[in-house]
Amino acid sequence: MNLIMNDYVAGLPSPLSFLGLGDLLARNMGLSPWSARVIPVLHRVDISEGRTKPEMERNERRKKDEPESFVPIETMEDLIGTVEVSLLLHLPGCESESVLRSQIEGRRIAGGLIQNDKVDVHSVTPDGSAFRGLRRGYTMIRPETAERRFITSGDRTPEQPGLARIAETLFSADRPPGFGWIVPSAVGYRLLEDPETVPQRIRTRSKDIPHVFAEPVLGITELVSVRNKRLTELTMDGLDALFWSWEARGDLVLGHPDYHPEPTNPEQPKEVITHG
């Protein structure tokens, strides 16, 4: 079962993919890390059949005293499937549409290259009117009802339910009017190690940022049409509550504060490199 992934969940791009892009843009523009906030709008998703099994080649970069090893040949373009998307993006401190446009071009979302010859960037009013100029599509947001905002890592503990509850919620036999379109989605990570005490590891992306092992956290997201009055009639506060943004509490680093099990004082995410 390939449900709990940070890139794709049940065939759809995860909100974390877009949140990762937003954080990359913020850092490259000299803005505060972890400050990016996003709402993805999916216009069209063509099915991806995945990539072919990569071939292996000898690792020519190994040191002389290391045993012979093999590495997979990366074939990033060996992907079948496309996503057409708009992104409501809040980058505190960003004041230039042209700079943002240049930063987006040529980036990747969920491993796939942004292939547009031109990326359109427009300033919008921060309320429901932001959706009215978009072509038809579906926002990917946290569920409206609190009962659907639970999380799990697959194991059953006193703090979290098992995967069965996710399935029971998604495929409920009782689907009254207004049940909505809900899908499983990766919504964050649970750290398996303490960044303060984790040992120094070799071959990591950064010598200064701790490398910790983590497991993905599964939740439920809701797809809502951009024509729905739930979106188009949002106030500024209502829209603000829907943005995905990183928030850390204890060993959980989640993409939206409403998924945290207990209301506690939010912490700024620690600078860590996660590896599942």
Image (cartoon, rainbow, N blue to C red):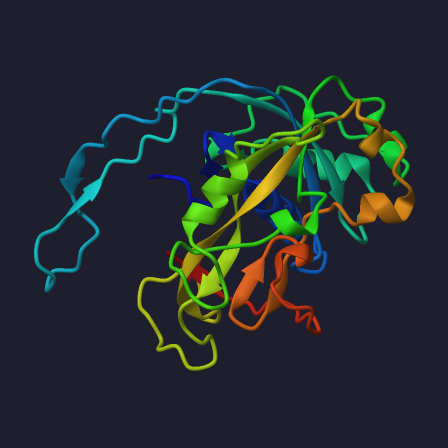
Q: Is residue 161 visible?
A: yes
Would you say 197 lies left or right of 179 here?
A: left
The foreground one among 89 and 114 is 89
| Residue 150 x %, y % | 57, 54
Mark count: 0
Name the quadrant containing residue 233.
top right
Q: Residue at left 18%, top 47%? A: 60
Q: Residue at left 57%, top 70%? A: 270
The foreground one among 9 and 34 is 9
Would you say 245 lies left or right of 150 here?
A: right
Is 115 rendered above or below residue 236?
Answer: above
Would you say 44 lies left or right of 276 here?
A: right
| Residue 182 x %, y % | 59, 34
| Residue 174 x %, y % | 58, 32
Name the quadrant containing residue 56.
top left
Q: Is residue 95 visible?
A: no
Q: Residue at left 43%, top 44%? A: 5
What is the quadrant of the N terminus in the image? top left
The foreground one among 174 and 121 is 174
What is the quadrant of the C terminus in the image? bottom left
Would you say 46 lies left or right of 139 here?
A: left
Residue occupying the far front of the picture:
174
Q: Residue at left 18%, top 55%? A: 62
